[in-house]
Image (spheres, helix red, strand yellow):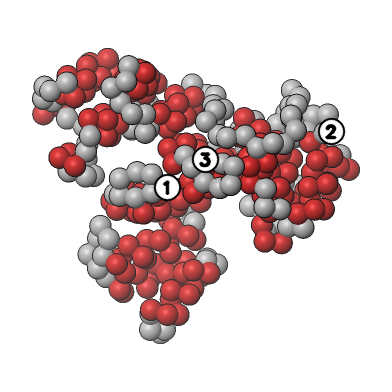
Amino acid sequence: MSSARSLALILTALAGGTLPLAAAPAPLRIAQAQLSAEDIFWQSIQSSSDPAMYQAYLDQVGAGRFTGIYKALAEIRIASLKGAVPIPKSVDQGSGRAVVIGNADPTAGSSAELEACDRAAAAAADPEKPASVPGVTFAAIDAGAAIRACRKAVDTAGAPRRAYFQLGRAIQKSGNTADAVTYLRKAVELGHAGAMHDLASILRRGAAGVKRDSGLAMALYERAAGTGLNESLVQLGAMYAEGSGVRRDYAKARDYYQRAIAAKTPGAYTNMGVLYANGQGVPRDRTKACEYWREGSTLGDEVAARNLRRSCRMR
C-alpha cells in the first residue's frame, strides 16, 4: 500500500471513520480508548520510513488539530530520513558568547589546544576522541581547567565537533547548565552523538535557565541511538517506563531495553531487571530480575550490582 493511501486511511479514521482490517497498523501498546487522536495518529506512523507521513503530522499541528507533543520527534525523523541533522530550535539559549563554526571536517582536528581540551574533558566512550586519550568521567572533570582549555580549542580554526561537546561538558560540570546548552547545541548541529544524548538528558528534566522539553529530549535520544549510541536506547526505555513526557508504556520500554541488551549495554540489564522485579508489563519474576542484574553487574553497572546485593541470593 502506498504511503499516500495509508495516510488517507489514517486521516479518515481520525476524522471519525474506521480503518479497514487490511490497513490496520501494528497493535497499539496502549488501549486506544485511553489515547487521543494525536496519539493514535502518531502510533500509526511512528515506524514509517516515509518523510511525508511525518510531514502530514506536522501539517496537523500547524492547522491546530494536534497539540504538537511529537513535533520535535517528527522533525528529527524527517531530517534523519533525508540525511540531515536538524537544529533543536526550541532549546533555550544561555548567555554564552556567540560561537562561529568553520567548514572543517567535524570529526577531524589536531592542535595543542585541542589536545589539552581532550585531556581535560573528553568522554571515555566518545569514539571521536584520540585513542591515546583515556577520557574523563563527568565527576572527575576539573571544570575551571577544562573550560579554559576547551575555550581555546573551539577558538582554533577548524575545531572539530568534539571540542564543542567537551566544552559543553566542562561548563555543565561548573554548574552553568544554560551556558553548557549553547555549546552542546553547536555540537548537535555538527552531528555529535554524545552531545545529542547529553542535551537530551538536560531537556528531559529541565534546569536553571533551560526549559524542560520532553518531546525534544526524546527526539534527540532517538537521533543519538540511530548513530549507534546505545545508552540512548536505555534512556528512551526509561522515559516510557516512567511515563516521563510520554504515556507510560512498559511494553515499549521493554522493547528499547531489549535492543540495548542486544548491544550489551549495561544499564539496559539493570532496567529490564526492574521491570521483572516489579512485574511492570511482564509477570513478576525475581529470578529473571536477578539474572539481568547479575549480567549488568558483570558488565560494570553499579546500580545492577547494588540491586544484586540487596535483592538476590548470591550463588
Q: Amino acid at mark 3?
A: Lys
Image disc number at residue 126: none
Residue at image position (46%, 50%) is 235
Q: Is residue 127 visible?
A: no
Residue 127 in the figure: left or right of residue 236: right
Q: Nearer the viewer, residue 39 or 236?
A: 39
Classify 242 as above or below 22.
Answer: below
Classify 315 as above or below 156.
Answer: below
Residue at image position (37%, 29%) is 68
Real-space CA distance between mark 2 and mark 3, rounded to the nearest whole angstrom: 31 Å
Total label count?
Answer: 3
Circle nearer the N terminus (3, 1):
3
Q: Which residue is mark 3?
A: 211
Q: Position of residue 229 (x, y in %)?
A: 54, 45
Circle nearer the N terminus (2, 3):
2
Q: Is residue 176 visible?
A: yes
